[in-house]
Amino acid sequence: MTTFSPELETTIAGVRSDVARLHGELVRYGLVVWTGGNVSGRVPGAPLFVIKPSGVAYDDLAPENMILCDLDGAVVPGTPGSERGPSSDTAAHAYVYRNMPQIGGVVHTHSTYAVAWAARGEEIPCVITGMADEFGGPIPVGPFAMIGDDSIGRGIVDTLRGHRSRAVLMQNHGPFTIGVSAEDAVKAAVMCEDAARTVHIAREAGPLIPIPQDRIDSLFRRYQNVYGQATDDRRALEEPR
Amino acid sequence: MTTFSPELETTIAGVRSDVARLHGELVRYGLVVWTGGNVSGRVPGAPLFVIKPSGVAYDDLAPENMILCDLDGAVVPGTPGSERGPSSDTAAHAYVYRNMPQIGGVVHTHSTYAVAWAARGEEIPCVITGMADEFGGPIPVGPFAMIGDDSIGRGIVDTLRGHRSRAVLMQNHGPFTIGVSAEDAVKAAVMCEDAARTVHIAREAGPLIPIPQDRIDSLFRRYQNVYGQATDDRRALEEPR
Amino acid sequence: MTTFSPELETTIAGVRSDVARLHGELVRYGLVVWTGGNVSGRVPGAPLFVIKPSGVAYDDLAPENMILCDLDGAVVPGTPGSERGPSSDTAAHAYVYRNMPQIGGVVHTHSTYAVAWAARGEEIPCVITGMADEFGGPIPVGPFAMIGDDSIGRGIVDTLRGHRSRAVLMQNHGPFTIGVSAEDAVKAAVMCEDAARTVHIAREAGPLIPIPQDRIDSLFRRYQNVYGQATDDRRALEEPR
Amino acid sequence: MTTFSPELETTIAGVRSDVARLHGELVRYGLVVWTGGNVSGRVPGAPLFVIKPSGVAYDDLAPENMILCDLDGAVVPGTPGSERGPSSDTAAHAYVYRNMPQIGGVVHTHSTYAVAWAARGEEIPCVITGMADEFGGPIPVGPFAMIGDDSIGRGIVDTLRGHRSRAVLMQNHGPFTIGVSAEDAVKAAVMCEDAARTVHIAREAGPLIPIPQDRIDSLFRRYQNVYGQATDDRRALEEPR
């Protein structure tokens, strides 16, 4: 059984609680069905993260059945929930945490409209101001990657490193989002589906008016400042390592 | 700390309560996600309005964290909620209240179908009787305008002054609605999305049958009378200043 | 103040309760927004029906604020709710009750997909077995008719008399449904929107396979028998007066 | 009145409870309206299954009004709920249980997008990884079949025997799904509608990227193992009898 300092235990308990609660937001916004989708959150100050167990109903998620993993995605033995397997996407989350140290949360869903763009391998163009605010440009497509090794994680990191967007549409698969915290990544998942749906519907009925690049830049910069949360970390996302 | 007469305090409390409660209608009808969207209400008899704080979850909105502003959009210091920033759209609301004295409420959302029309810069044609009743004709498009000065407010007022519609689709952005009260503006936001969705879906499948203008006029006049709320104020919306 | 025999009072109370409760089904299935839509139910054995008041929120509907009307659509004075105006569609409901004695309930909504077909003036073809069961063929379109006299009621009756369908799409307006009871009419409103949505979506993606007429006939006859409620009354709907 | 051993009574009670509860999942995911749709579950170790009664509201379903049938679809007399008629689709469920001994649950809905594909008689192509995981390839179409004899059951069995998919779209009618348990069949119904909706929306906007067959095979095999429930039974579905 693994033990931690009382301070770290308290920190881990807080992350468990956040991650469990944030799964409810995926349900609220209709981003997931059955047991699909997953949220994880990094444990600040430790090489650990907390993720959803595999195949457990959303109604049954609670802090104590969230699973604590190290940055290789291995379950920390003897911790609450460790008798269960973690999400089958754990390797992809772990890869992101290992390779993007500024990232505090990762989310994966199969939300309808985002998957639809992914099935065509088409990025979502930035034609609405809400998308400029949140993503600072188009939402990009990542490669087709099979589950089971680092392919998905590498596809996420290679696509989002140096990119303003916190969302990537993995081809034929679905969206992964990242953020400075688990909540920030969940917000990105919600806004990604909202953008995917709105732009899909807009384009069904005729040509879209582009937003000039300098306006997109200006909207993005303003929004990141006005909302002012963890701006430095977010700026770091844009910088190649 | 700002103080008001007991009568004005009571009036302000009522507006706070209405504005907080009415945000729930945006959630109920699926017009907003996360912390997006905002409702404001004018304080009758005073150069003041009440608006949503910035970045607060819908579950946490309550009368005491609504924010009281003057007609320049400045937060009234020392009043409940004033420690927080008001909605980032406050300047646009303030511009409307300064320039349309008959208006008692303003609402902004990024509701899906209304934004879709806005992304094409296309007005919604009036082909259903419910839209004739409520808006008296098409829902118009306003200019592309950047946040941060009076551009959005001016775009709203220039488009809606002298127009029957209480909704404008700001290009590439989304709907703003006005009303004789905050509730009336919320109703306009609900009906605007309903019209945007229905007409979008109708047109996907073939040509729409127009409603003759004299029938639209007659439906609009009847509805404004039958429902009879604040008809004089509403009529004022149609008159250029 | 109007008084009735104790037996009739009990009957009226039952209809008030049913009609109030059934409005909740319109909300549950997303057929209405704000205060739109209305359900009415005939009072068995008396020339009376019960209908929703005008402009009251769905949350506030209760048996005691439903409104009792005679078959000319006049509010029965001195009865509960009579201080309010009845639904602005009351004249249309009354016309149906006067002219289709076998009908026990009428419903009107502006449900999205049904209105979409109505805006094109296009009947919904019967290409799914659920529609054959419920409507026995296509859902027809009625004329464009203005509110304020018998035009809407006459359009409903002229279209549905001698027709298997319990739903009519009034052009540019929306669906009206009838039934042997208020509940039966509400079911027809739910199934009408379901059919309108499904067939719309089906046809977006390619040509639909027709169902041979004799199969439609056989499905309809079987369903009306198997479910066996008030079959005689339903059969009466198919017979011209 | 039919009596069983105490052990079998306990087993039947468990199936009644599961089947009643699982109907709630059809409502939660919006797969059914009014009283449409039905779930059944085989009683392990006995030639019996439990199914929904006909025409009862979803709010009123409970273990004690579920109906116990033999494998010919006849209601077992003197058991709870037996005074009511079983679902009008009982004959189709019974045919599946008689002819696919490895199947423990059957579900039927008229879910919107699945019915839309069925109305065109078009199988759903496997272009998203979630569909490869769950169905191992396309979701096939079954024949047009009339209710009232074994036609529907035979169409289901003839289509799904030897097929990886646990869902079939009966032409002009809707989806039937099977599973190793009632819960597994309900999951298949949820995932079938999710796939039908996502692929429909994806294809509206342009050509879809196919997933190579060997990747589909590999995703399907992995998912069936990782989730590891009743793999042997599931494998049996792929083998012709």
Image (cartoon, coloured by chain):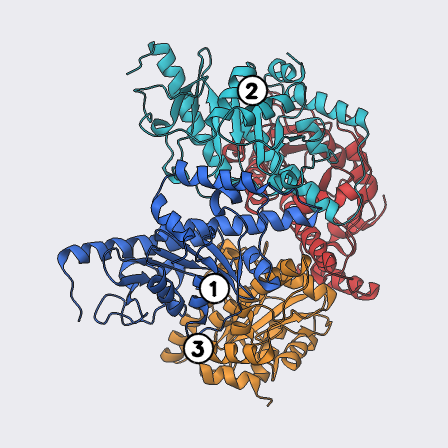
Chain colours: A cyan, B red, C orange, D blue
Gap in Å between the C-alphas at discs 3 and 1? Answer: 26 Å
Q: Are marks 3 and 1 on the same chain?
A: yes
Q: Residues within 10 Å of mark 1 (few under 14, many from 20)?
A: many
Q: Is residue D195 above or below residue A101?
A: below
Q: Position of residue B64 (x, y in %)?
A: 52, 30
Q: Are marks 3 and 2 on the same chain?
A: no
Say which chain tag 2 marks: A
Q: Secondary structure at mark 2?
A: loop
Residue at 31% from the left image edge and 14% from the top image edge: A2
Binning the other alpha carbons within 10 Å of mark 3 as few (below 14), some (14 to 19) or many (20 upward) gives few
- Horizontal relation, residue D58 to residue B179: left or right: left
Dot 3: element: loop
Residue placed at 63% from the left, 38% from the top? A118
Q: Which mark is residue A180?
A: 2
Q: What is the chain letter for disc 3?
A: C
Residue that badge 3 annotates? C3
